[in-house]
Amino acid sequence: MTTDRSIEEPCEVTSLTHGFEAERRGRPLRLGSALLDRLKATGLPVETGSGGLTKFNRFQRKMAKTHWGDAACVGRSTPQVLKVDQIHPLRIRATGHGRRQMCVTDKYGFPKQHKGRKGTYLGYRTGDMVKAVTPNGTFQGRIAIRYRPSFRLGKIDIHPKYMRRLHRVDGYAYHDERSA
């Protein structure tokens, strides 16, 4: 007779080393995550697994180490063949909403130009994605407002009458790997 708990009894994890010890002994870990509880409440099938099982599944299927690849390999129900050659994930990067710089300084740190107080001009904000069809060509990208009727689009100045907004700035940059 052992003093250890039953294998079927879940173990409450109190520290990182305690979690590793419980997993080594073969006891399932109790995931007290509110997110997991909410996902299970939807009624959809939810599966969790250890990092070791995820790595094993990824290695068996010869997949690269990526976040979306790990998500596909979690748990025991991972299929033997995963068709991932046509999958192109959307890369999302946090860019923020600018900085709180009140003035431009010279190389010695003395103020040389004060920043404008407004965050928008003619309904546009710095970081908006626009498409500009001008007599000189078509341009697309992020703009920088300048508090006068011309905006910076890359290295060129664009008048707002040529611009059409594609996406309002939301603090994130999006990149589709297919377009790269």
Image (cartoon, rainbow, N blue to C red):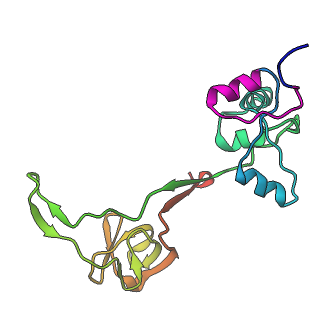
- Location of the N terminus (image quadrant): top right
| Residue at the image point whose x is 75% and y is 29% from the top | 62
Magenta region: which residues? 6-24
Q: Is residue 128 or residue 178 the one in the foreground?
A: 128
Magenta segment: does it hold 125? no
Q: Residue lying farthest top?
A: 1
Where residue 121 sits, quadrant-wise, is: bottom left
Q: How many marks?
A: 0
Residue 110 in the image: x percent, y percent? 8, 59
Residue 117 in the image, given as x and y percentages of width and height? 26, 77
**For this view, does 105 lie left or right of residue 55?**
left
Residue at (83% x, 44% y) in the render: 47
**Position of 142 relative to 94 (above/below):** below
Residue at 51 percent across and 54 percent down: it is 93
Whether the magenta-drawn stretch holds residue 11 is answered as yes
Q: Would you say 132 lies left or right of 51 here?
A: left
Name which quarter of the figure residue 113 lies in.
bottom left
Q: Vertically, is 173 above or below 11?
A: below
Q: Nearer the viewer, residue 83 or 56?
A: 56
Q: Is residue 128 above or below residue 11?
A: below
